[in-house]
């Protein structure tokens, strides 16, 4: 069974908790045992598992910005801190690079109709080039 989640981001970099929506799709599938794929078909977004705690979410976003901005997320040129070739076309090379590092998918085991994940693991859409409308595909097998 395959279904979609649609999300609208409001910020350039943003974490959006989609856990409840994924679990609703799993429940509605009626499938009890198997695998669940959560996939975002966008090269400037990712799927991230982390705790839904405000400080930790800010830590993630700050860390990711520093990775691509010369370690100064508040710098005026934070988006293009490195001399990325792709920025000459779209000015979003940072988003593509971070998406590739984080990944656009996660696979979860499904047992007894329940998504198996750690107690503090929430499923997030990681927006890296917003604001945008994003589609997340959830496949339950």
Image: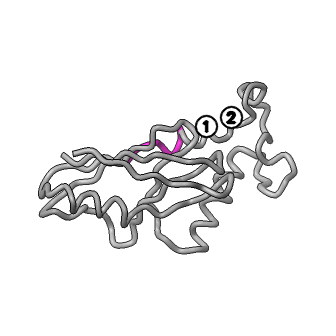
Q: Quadrant of residue 40?
A: top left
Q: Is residue 60 one of those drawn in magenta? A: no
For the rendered model, the colour scheme is one colour
Residue carrying label 2: 93
Residue at the spot x=46%, y=52% of the render? Answer: 6
- Judged left or right of residue 126, residue 138 is left
Residue 66 horizontal/vertical position (percent):
71, 52
Q: In the image, residue 24 lies at what x, y percent?
A: 29, 63
User: Residue, x 76% and y 51% (percent of image)?
Assistant: 71
Residue 110: x percent and y percent?
A: 19, 57
- The residue that label 1 is drawn on is 97
In this rendering, is residue 17 above or below 75? below
Is 38 in front, or is 3? 3
**Nearest to the observer: residue 82 or residue 130:** 130
The residue at the point 68 percent across, 40 percent down is 94
In the shown orientation, is residue 32 left or right of residue 58? left
**Mark 2: few/some/many CA within 10 Å (<14, 14-19, 20+):** many
Describe residue 78's horizontal placement relative to residue 104 as left or right: right
What label sits on residue 107 in the rendered view?
none
Marks 2 & 1, CB-CB < 8 Å contact:
yes
Q: Is residue 56 above or below residue 109?
A: below
- Residues in magenta, as a range: 100-106
Q: In front: 117, or 39? A: 39
Judged from the image, the secondary structure of the residue bearing numbered disc 1 is: helix
State the SS at label 2: helix
Q: Bin the neighbour count of mark 1 within 10 Å (Cα to Cα): few under 14, some 14-19, many 20 and up.
A: some
- Tag count: 2
Position in image of residue 120 (x %, y %): 39, 71
């Amino acid at each position: 069974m395959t279904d979609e989640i649609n999300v609208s981001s409001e910020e350039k970099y943003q974490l959006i908790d989609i856990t409840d929506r994924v679990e609703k799709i799993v429940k509605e599938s009626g499938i009890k045992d198997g695998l669940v794929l959560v996939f975002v078909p966008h090269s400037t977004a990712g799927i991230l598992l982390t705790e839904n705690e405000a400080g930790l979410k800010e830590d993630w976003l700050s860390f990711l910005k520093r990775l691509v901005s010369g370690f100064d997320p508040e710098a005026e040129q934070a988006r293009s801190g490195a001399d990325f070739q792709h920025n000459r076309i779209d000015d979003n090379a940072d988003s593509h690079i971070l998406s590739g590092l984080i990944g656009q998918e996660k696979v979860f085991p499904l047992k007894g109709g329940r998504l198996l994940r750690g107690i503090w693991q929430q499923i997030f859409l990681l927006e890296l080039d917003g604001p945008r409308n994003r589609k997340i595909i959830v496949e339950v097998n």
